[in-house]
Amino acid sequence: MTALTSCSKDDDAAPSSQALLTAKEWQGNKYLIDGQDMSSFLDIDQMYWKFNTNGTYTMRADGDSENGTWELTSNNQKLLLDGEFTLDIVKLTNTALNVKYEDEDIESGESYTVEIRFIRD
């Protein structure tokens, strides 16, 4: 007696970080400094990022646009922009991209954490 069995491939595999990042354009939602919401001081909802599958990006804000290159590093936990600026990926889902980085006040020398949260439909 011979029995045949088959396993179905799981078609609902989670999308890769690159697929999540490049699926659609991201719109700014919140701008936090050391955890405090500073969004009201900026037109954060007028900031847009579009990551392309060829490793390029376009950022639009305040009527200006900037183009550059991007790469996921550190096991998809970091986003390297233009080969020199690294953002930590705090959250990346179908509808949310949260990134953070450390910055320093030029005058006081004090460091602080900036977190930018993006959303999309």
Image (cartoon, grey):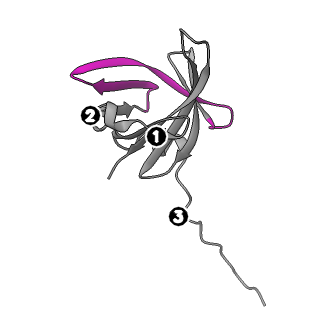
> Main SS of the magenta segment?
strand
When the figure is inspected, residue 112 is found, relative to residue 38, above or below; the finding is above
Gap between marks 2 and 1 measured at Cα:
19 Å
Displayed quadrant of residue 111: top right
Q: x, y percentage for residue 114? A: 52, 30
When the figure is inspected, residue 19 is found, relative to residue 71, above or below; the finding is below
- The residue sitting at the top extreme is 107
- SS for dot 1: helix
Indicate yes or no whether the magenta region holds residue 57. Answer: yes
The residue that label 3 is drawn on is: 11
Kind of residue at badge 3: Asp
**Residue ID at (59%, 66%):** 9
Q: Give the magenta-colored segment's residue range.
A: 53-77
- SS for dot 2: helix
The residue that label 2 is drawn on is: 46
Indicate yes or no whether the magenta region holds residue 2. Answer: no
Kind of residue at badge 2: Gln
Kind of residue at badge 1: Leu
